[in-house]
Amino acid sequence: MNAAELQDVAIVGAGPAGAALARRLALDGRKVVLIEASRFDRARIGESLSPDIQPELLGLGLRDRFLALKPLPSWGTRSIWGEPAAQARSHLTSPWCSGWHVDRTAFDLMLAEAARETGVQWIEACRVRAVRHDGTAWCVHAGGNVWRSRWIVDATGRSARIARGIGARRMLFDSLVGIAAVCADPGHAERHHLLVEAVEDGWWYSAPLPGGPAPSTIAMLMTDGDLCARAALHRADGWRAAMARSVATRCRVDAAACGAPRVHLAHSHRLLRPTVPAPGPWLAVGDASLAVDPLSGSGVLRALRHAREAATVIGEAIERPAHVDELIASFDAVRDSECTDYLIERAQHYAVEQRFESPFWRRRSRAPAGPAAAIDKPHAAAL
Ligand SMILES: Cc1cc2nc3c(=O)[nH]c(=O)nc-3n(C[C@H](O)[C@H](O)[C@H](O)COP(=O)(O)OP(=O)(O)OC[C@H]3O[C@@H](n4cnc5c(N)ncnc54)[C@H](O)[C@@H]3O)c2cc1C
């Protein structure tokens, strides 16, 4: 490891966005350090991948390695949404024919290893608390060293920890949480699609989970954080009682054969740049930049697309430093329009469900643009 050498880019967070960006930049000959808080030793969430993931994997040169993970093909989605009858949407109409159900820990680790193999300096089990700029370069304390880099990229996911430390704020669009448990395999016929079911409290998602000693299923109730706390839906008895009130999910998943539920933050947000410009160039990618409702099933796909676009922007900015502000602004403008499109689609989708009068649905389906936005508190500045 050579921490004394000035890196082109320091990326904090080795989820799909950070790892894919690191690999692309390193393949373009950039010097990159990638710093990750974990050792990929805890189960990760977000296992259903859209068919459109396939060109991104091809672009990264990783389709064969992805298939070697033995993901389960997903033939489509069944949803009970807006009416009691299930609607089926097949992936066979997509040019790529199938989506995938993956072991997310194995998928993320594969991307991180592929980045490392391209020459990226890799530091794991190191949580970056803050970064600062010394007037010529960004300085990041990690792995007992101080890494200096021209660019810093926040790929820390929904927390947007690094960007918030340099003054960015999140515009929060909701307070969604997912309460998930791993359950017994419901059998072969249920192993190739995901099920979404709207219920009074929010909506259920269930999907097959490959990996592990035996096939299993993940079941997750999506609701708002305050509603989860009020009805104790995070507790095993509250969660099971909520499942008992569903129609299709409880037929597919045996609540008695599920592990302990765990709460995951799933709010939507868009990151806002600070009004006072930071002293050096930075970008946020993936969920740190724009986090979307898991209903869209597009989080990982967006993360990989952000990585591709960010690699182009950073590469061009290194070649043409006089244009750095313009290139960053163009990346942000694309994210703004992505956010607008997302909010319109989300509002339209939730508005289809009019059967429930509960707070969860009143917050979503009555307002044309969905729930109102709030700006979060600034993070402790770290410059
Ligand atoms: C409940 C739920 C269900 C979902 N289901 C799906 C789904 O089925 N399909 C789908 O496509 N998407 C799904 N998503 C969304 C998807 O998981 C995310 O969009 C995707 O993981 C974003 O990738 P990322 O790299 O931006 O962030 P992340 O995957 O969150 O990765 C961030 C990385 O940064 C690291 N990190 C964080 N802070 C620090 C720090 N301070 N220092 C160093 N490292 C740090 C973390 O350990 C992590 O490795 C779901 C999300 C939720 C919440």
Image (cartoon, rainbow, N blue to C red):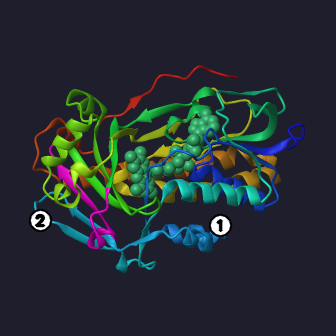
Q: Is residue 273 above or below residue 62?
A: above
Label 2 lies in ligand 1 vicinity (Cβ under 8 Å): no
Quadrant of the snapshot with the N terminus: top right
Q: Is residue 165 magenta?
A: no
Q: Amino acid at mark 2?
A: Ala
Question: 333 or 250, which is in the foreground?
Answer: 250
Q: Is residue 57 left or right of residue 135?
A: left
Q: Position of residue 27 (x, y in %)?
A: 77, 62
SS under mark 2: loop
Q: Amino acid at mark 1?
A: Leu
* Residue identifier under label 1: 60
Q: Which mark is residue 85?
A: 2
Question: 104 or 173, which is in the foreground?
Answer: 104
Q: Is residue 193 above or below residue 26?
A: below
Question: 371 or 55, which is in the foreground?
Answer: 55
The residues colored magenta run 184-200
Q: Is residue 71 left or right of residue 332?
A: left
Q: Earlier in the sequence, mark 1 or mark 2?
A: 1
Q: Position of residue 194 (x, y in %)?
A: 31, 63
Q: Position of residue 94 (x, y in %)?
A: 40, 77
Res 87 → quadrant? bottom left
